[in-house]
Image (cartoon, rainbow, N blue to C red):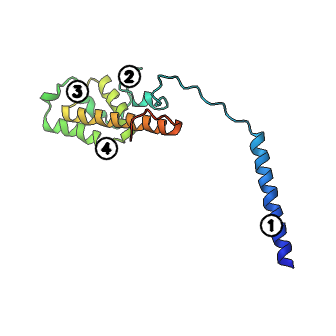
Amino acid sequence: MTIYILIALLLILIAAVALFVRRQNRLTPEKPPREVPADCCGSHAVCERDSLLSSTEEIIYFDDEELDALSGIPADEMTDQQVKMIEDVFFTLREQDVAGWLRSIQLRRIELPQFIRDEAFLVVAERREHTAALYAEKHGDKTAPAK
């Protein structure tokens, strides 16, 4: 008999909690949906970070101050050691930092060897595509590129 009473009390407690949660959800105002322009790529949260165009002249360093010595040297005239300096920095960057690093390199007038430039642009393009696909998935856009 005691077990039946405990089960009944447990069911009443569960029902009370469910009613309380439902009432709280009704009282909590919903956030209005954000207006997204029709021409939006969906990457606005990261577009500026992934952009290769610099909107400011502020140089941000990625623990690569030693590369300033390469400013003004054409990429095809760099020594193997100078190219290795650039490689060492590039291959230790986080994927999300590549676009910012490219902007920094551009502002510092450092030419990149072609193979590093190609690899960096590939990383940036893949990040943009991935971000657009995530946005489309989150917002139900069927026209976005597949992952």
* Residue type at the position of mark 3: Glu
| Real-space CA distance between mark 4 and mark 2, rounded to the nearest whole angstrom | 22 Å
Please name whichever residue, 118 or 57, is drawn nearer the observer in this view of the structure.
118
**Residue 85 at x, y percent in the picture:** 22, 38
Which residue is identified by label 1?
A: 10
For the residues marked 1 and 3, what is the alpha-carbon distance in whole angstroms? 71 Å
Q: Secondary structure at mark 2?
A: loop
Residue at 80% across, 58% down: 15
Q: Which residue is mark 3?
A: 111
Residue 37 coordinates in the image, percent (x, y): 52, 22
Q: Which of the numbered marks, if any, corresponds to residue 92? A: 4
The image quarter containing residue 72 is top left
* Quarter containing the C terminus: top left
In this rendering, the answer to whether 54 lies above or below 28 is above
Q: Circle 2 sits on which residue?
A: 54
Q: Residues within 10 Å of mark 3 (few under 14, many from 20)?
A: some
Q: CA separation, marks 4 and 3?
A: 18 Å
Q: Earlier in the sequence, mark 4 or mark 2?
A: 2
Marks 3 and 2, how far apart at CA: 16 Å
Q: Quadrant of residue 65?
A: top left
* Amino acid of disc 4: Thr
